Image: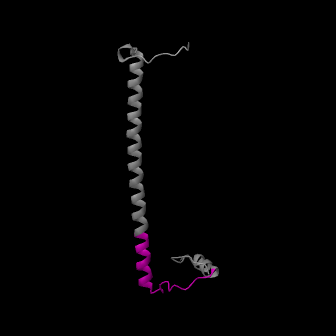
Amino acid sequence: MWPWKRQPTVAEVPQDHSDRLRSVEKTLEDLAISHRKLRLEWEDVYDRISKAVARLNARDRAEQKREGRAQDDGAPQTLDEINAAIRRGAPPTAFRRQ
């Protein structure tokens, strides 16, 4: 009634199909390897950036101690104070609005 085709057995698969299947499997394996390498590379970049940011933060804290700048006392800062600090080139460590 319906012209359904049955699945060929392994012995019936033509040679060109098995060559194509090997090619597709190799391509898939190469893509998986490339994806793994790229993921590892980005993890490495992320780690380097995090360490650089941590070093900058530590340097800033040490500089604040050395210069005797008052630490953040927990009082809310106004937008004018925040803008003035940014214009001086020393943005506050935490921006808070009232």
Q: Position of residue 12 (x, y in %)?
A: 38, 13
Q: Where's the N terminus, which quadrant?
A: top right
Q: Position of residue 51 (x, y in %)?
A: 39, 64
Magenta residues span 55-78
Residue drawn at the location 44% of the way across and 18% of the way down: 7
Instruction: Name the one closer to the observer, 20 or 71.
Output: 20
Outermost residue to the right: 80
- The quarter of the picture where residue 15 lies is top left
The vertical placement of 68 against 26, above or below, is below
Q: Where's the C terminus, which quadrant?
A: bottom right
Residue drawn at the location 40% of the way across and 54% of the way down: 43
Residue drawn at the location 64% of the way across and 81% of the way down: 80
Residue drawn at the location 40% of the way across and 79% of the way down: 62
On whether residue 77 falls in the magenta region, the answer is yes
- The quarter of the picture where residue 52 lies is bottom left
Outermost residue to the front: 1
Q: How many marks?
A: 0
On whether residue 92 falls in the magenta region, the answer is no
Q: Position of residue 57 (x, y in %)?
A: 43, 72
The vertical placement of 97 against 18, above or below, is below
Instruction: Name the one closer to the observer, 87 or 45.
Output: 45
Outermost residue to the left: 11
Q: Position of residue 94 (x, y in %)?
A: 52, 76
The vertical placement of 30 against 50, above or below, is above
Q: How is the image coloured?
A: one colour
